[in-house]
Image: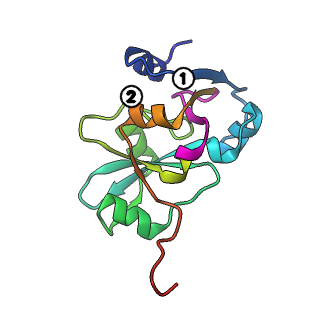
């Protein structure tokens, strides 16, 4: 089965591997990772945030990671950001929460951010756009496909006082 995310990668000659898992698998990066046999860190969460300017951005984190608010605000360049509502996410991406691909749907100028520690992983899994389908891709090829900026989103910034 070829989904739009597969076609997007094929057209750009970006290597990846298709993986399938039972659609009855409970939602969540940890569950997908467990079923497919890779670490939760390697299961990329694709989160859509809204900025006070109306801009929407994609933030990619490992399944076991959470962004430090200050780091996220610094990367995006706004102090007024929030997770997008499900209807806004579907309107923005064309996908429902649970299997949003990290690429293929962004209009020109759309900003995407990848947590810096994920570049150390040998392979990452991202939703293919349909629950039960996963794309396994190297961090370098994920960056290439999503045009992501690699930023520290999870480690607190060190200050001289620490």
SS assignment at label 1:
loop
Q: Residue furthest top?
A: 1
- Residue that numbered label 1 is attached to: 16
Residue at (40%, 53%) from the top-left corner? 49
Q: Please provide percent x and percent y for residue 88.
A: 38, 46
Residue 119 in the figure: left or right of residue 107: right
Between the C-alphas of marks 2 and 1, the distance is 14 Å
Residue 100 vs 50, above or below: the answer is: above
Which comes before the other along the chain, label 2 or label 1?
1
The front one of 125 and 143 is: 143
Residue 3 in the figure: left or right of residue 147: right
Q: Residue furthest front?
A: 160
Q: Please provide percent x and percent y for residue 44.
A: 56, 42
Say if the magenta span includes residue 124: yes
- Residue that numbered label 2 is attached to: 104
Magenta stretch bounds: 119-132
The front one of 4 and 67 is: 67
């Amino acid at each position: 089965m070829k989904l739009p995310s597969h076609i997007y990668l094929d057209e750009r000659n970006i290597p990846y591997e298709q993986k399938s898992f039972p659609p009855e698998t409970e939602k969540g990066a940890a569950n997908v990772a467990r079923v497919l046999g890779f670490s939760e860190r390697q299961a990329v969460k694709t989160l859509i945030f809204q900025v006070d300017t109306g801009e929407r951005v994609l933030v990619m984190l490992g399944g076991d990671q959470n962004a430090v608010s200050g780091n996220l605000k610094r990367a995006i360049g706004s102090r007024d950001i929030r997770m997008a509502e499900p209807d806004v996410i579907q309107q923005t991406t064309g996908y429902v929460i649970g299997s949003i691909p990290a690429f293929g749907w962004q209009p020109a100028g759309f900003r995407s951010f990848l947590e810096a520690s994920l570049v150390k992983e040998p392979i990452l899994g991202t939703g293919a756009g349909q629950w039960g389908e996963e794309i396994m891709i190297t961090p370098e090829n994920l960056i290439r496909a999503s045009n992501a900026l690699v930023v520290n989103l999870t480690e607190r910034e060190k200050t001289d006082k620490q």
